[in-house]
Amino acid sequence: MASFEAELDSESHIVQVVVTEDDGSEHDYQFDFDPSSGRWEFSERDLLERDFGEEWVDELEEEIEKLIAKGVESAGGSA
């Protein structure tokens, strides 16, 4: 099963995600968010669900949302 690592770049208001597949190949994704509201888009969701399954993508989405909440908090917003 593929794995992912997610990292918050608070200054740029971005969550960066690296997905590593079983064969070792890596895919980078970047999710911009509004630092005042936490609003973001997940246009890649369908593609990732097709490749890795709904449960896997749900876990990824939860991690992204946790990091965005931290970013909004550090920016003084209210997600």
Image (spheres, rainbow, N blue to C red):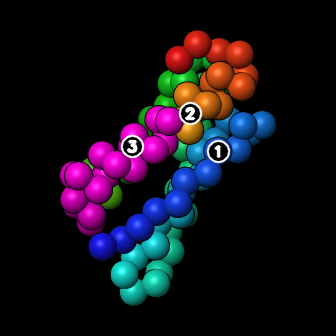
Label 1 environment density (alpha carbons within 10 Å; few <14, some 14–19, many ≥20): some
Assess whether residue 6 is covered by the magenta stretch. Answer: no
Magenta-tinted stretch: 49-66
- Residue 16 lies, in percent from the top left, at 59, 52
Q: Name the amino acid type tagged 2.
A: Ile
Classify mark 3: helix, strand or loop: helix
CA distance for labels 1 and 3: 13 Å
Residue labelled with disc 2: 68
Residue labelled with disc 1: 8
- Residue 39 lies, in percent from the top left, at 51, 24
Say whether marks 2 and 1 touch (CB < 8 Å): yes
**Of marks 2 and 1, which one's residue comes earlier in the chain?**
1
Classify mark 1: helix, strand or loop: strand
Residue labelled with disc 3: 61
Outermost residue to the top: 78
CA distance for labels 2 and 1: 7 Å
